[in-house]
Image (spheres, rainbow, N blue to C red):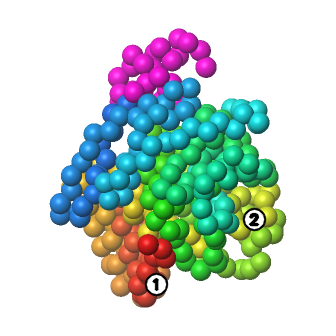
Amino acid sequence: MTDSWAAECASTSINTVRERSEADTTDATIPFFFNGGGSQDSVWRRRVTVRVRDGWIHGELPGPEGRTYQVERAPRDDFTFVRLAIPRPNLVLHTTQAPDLKERYKTWDFPPQFGVGDHRIVQLFPVWAQGKASKAQDERAMQIEITGFSKTARWLPFRHALQPLVALVAFLHERKLIKTGLSRPTDDWPIAVDHLPAAVFDYYRRKAGLWPDVAGVYGHIELPGDDHWDPGGFDYPEFFGMVRDVLGGDEDMRVDELIKGNQAYREKFKTKGEDAGPPPQDKSDDFKEGWRQARFAANNPQPFQPEGS
């Protein structure tokens, strides 16, 4: 990165900077408006200023229920910082297979860019640098280790890991440091882990041809060249809803598009008498989310109680 590029970022308008590679907008302070909590009928928004300096996040990230999370910087200087191959990689989720975070991140053999747990967010590498948590895809992945234990059935982490994870993903999505934090690469993969064994190099999701070109939030289980199955049956629909709640935005327009997508799926489902498939690709993200929510409800009629407290 050149000094002139950093200076240009610092003097460019906010909207223009957001369209650039956000990993390179060092020393640029950007204001964000986040939903601070409450129901959709009573939403209040907070103006939050967070700085990314030389790839390190400075400031408190808003999370669920109005809580904020200070990003702790803990550089893994025992590794060489290597630049990512692309400016906006896909997000990849891992689990630590441990009950808490404490200071375990200091000795992880395969550290990602971020770790969450104990109501904390820890950053180990600059946002422009590769993590070291996969066997073959580090150069194209923004990776987060989540405190907790993967399950093959649908699950979510305990609140002490889930809430800072939501805050971090909302920020990465809003700052365009990842391709998206609001959808999976395909709706055809079930939430629960299927076609076991999954901890194998030739697992069918790894061979789907979606990574790395198709935008989405991936699990370690879906990375080509790997044989881990975390985070298992992570409940992505529930999680994405939490991220959207934090992001807020133009709430009336969002809700309108969500309703349109929801209604469109239900009409298709009623007409066909069977699953209407993934959402149309030419629609807005909120329309697609409404479609996905309706699709999930139609095909999973039993309510789900998130694990944890």
Q: Main secondary structure of the magenta part?
A: helix
Q: Horizontal placement of 121 versus 44: left or right?
A: right
Q: Horizontal placement of 299 versus 135: left or right?
A: left
Q: Amino acid at mark 1?
A: Asn
Q: Is residue 181 above or below residue 184?
A: above
Q: Which residue is mark 2?
A: 228
Callout 2: helix, strand or loop? loop
- Residue 55 is situated, as x and y percent measured from the top left of the image, at 56, 31
Q: Quadrant of the N terminus?
A: top right
Residue sitting nearer the eye, 144 or 12: 144
- Residue 74 is situated, as x and y percent measured from the top left of the image, at 61, 39
Q: Is residue 295 above or below residue 172?
A: below
Residue at point 71%, 80% (across, down): 195
Q: Is residue 181 above or below residue 222?
A: above
Residue at point 28%, 57% (across, down): 37
What segment is highlighted magenta in the picture? 1-29
Q: Horizontal placement of 129 versus 273: left or right?
A: right
- Is residue 28 inside the magenta stretch? yes
Q: Which mark is residue 284?
A: none
- Residue 76 is situated, as x and y percent measured from the top left of the image, at 70, 38
Residue at point 59%, 51% (across, down): 115
- Is residue 35 inside the magenta stretch? no
In front of the other: label 2 or label 1? 2
The mark nearer the N terminus, 2 or 1, is 2
The reply to whether residue 179 is in sight is no
